[in-house]
Amino acid sequence: MTSVDLLTVTHDPEGRLLSQLQQYEQVLADLYHDCWITVSDQSSEELIQYLLYDSQFNVEVIPKHGAANARRAVVEFGLASESTHFHYCDLDRLITWMRYHQEELHSLIRNIPQSDYLIIGRTDKAMSTHPESWIETEKITNKICSFKLGKEVDITAGSCAFSHKICEMIQVHSEASMTDAEWMMIAQKQARTEIDVVEVDGLEYHEALNAPNKSMKEVEQWFSRLRLSMVISETIIKQDFN
């Protein structure tokens, strides 16, 4: 029998996700077979205490060493599960999804067991809600990845799904400074599995929930997003020639 667990991560120094997480805790518990969360040790103490002692989730507090390390940590943590499949989603993205498109999320989770690896991207409508600096720079990364796969994909939306077997392979092989494209490349090159694609409205952007923790001037935002795009794109090229 198939089942789907959630893998998610957060770094939330201000605890801005706390009230939303408390509000949707039971929804999460009902949507997934089990939930696995890594939270940075620099997140708000109130959030950490809630997750560890008052929530229904499996929680691990980890040192803050960047998004890629947090994602690898939750993959390793979640492998204690016997579920057949996993849905990875950044926590702020997941809360937005539950708040505004809960039925879509429920439908997606039901269909996850049909794929070994699923890229979960954004519809044009969802993409249009993001800041211009995100849209324009992510076009480059997504174009490079689309060339690689031979089909249009959105690899930078912060969500994907995979089988337990692929999860094990990610745990062994993941080492890049960004995982957005790397995990897909591991599934394709190491497991030689078919890469499926779906687009959703639920990965839209809401400033109050999805904005970066650190405020930046507009020029800094553009440079930061451009640098991120380059790092993810380099992962695709390096994996392709390894």
Image (cartoon, rainbow, N blue to C red):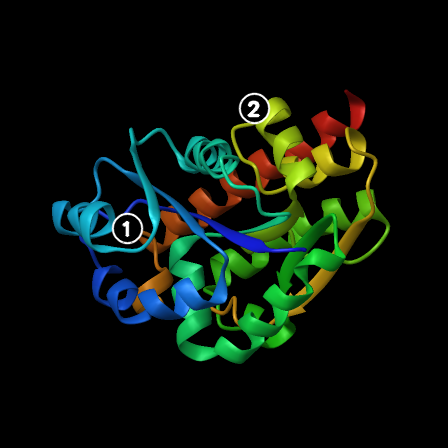
Give the image quarter of residue 67: top left
Total marks placed: 2
Q: Mark on residue 147?
A: none
Q: Amino acid at mark 2?
A: Glu
Q: Residue at x 63, y 31 (%)?
A: 168
Q: Mark on residue 213?
A: 1
Residue 174 visible in the shown view: yes
- Give the vertical position of 28 relative to 221 (above or below): below
Q: Residue at x 79, y 23 (%)?
A: 241
- Give the vertical position of 111 relative to 49 (above or below): below
Q: Position of residue 99 (x, y in %)?
A: 39, 75
Q: Mark on residue 175?
A: 2
Residue 156 visible in the shown view: no
Give the image quarter of residue 131: bottom left
Q: Residues at badges 2 and 1 in contact (C-beta under 8 Å)?
A: no
Q: Position of residue 90 (x, y in %)?
A: 44, 52
Q: Residues within 10 Å of mark 1 (few under 14, many from 20)?
A: few
Q: Is residue 121 left or right of residue 102?
A: right
- Give the vertical position of 149 relative to 26 (above or below): above
SS for dot 1: loop
Q: Amino acid at mark 1?
A: Asn
Rounded to the nearest angstrom, the CA distance separating label 2 from label 1 is 25 Å
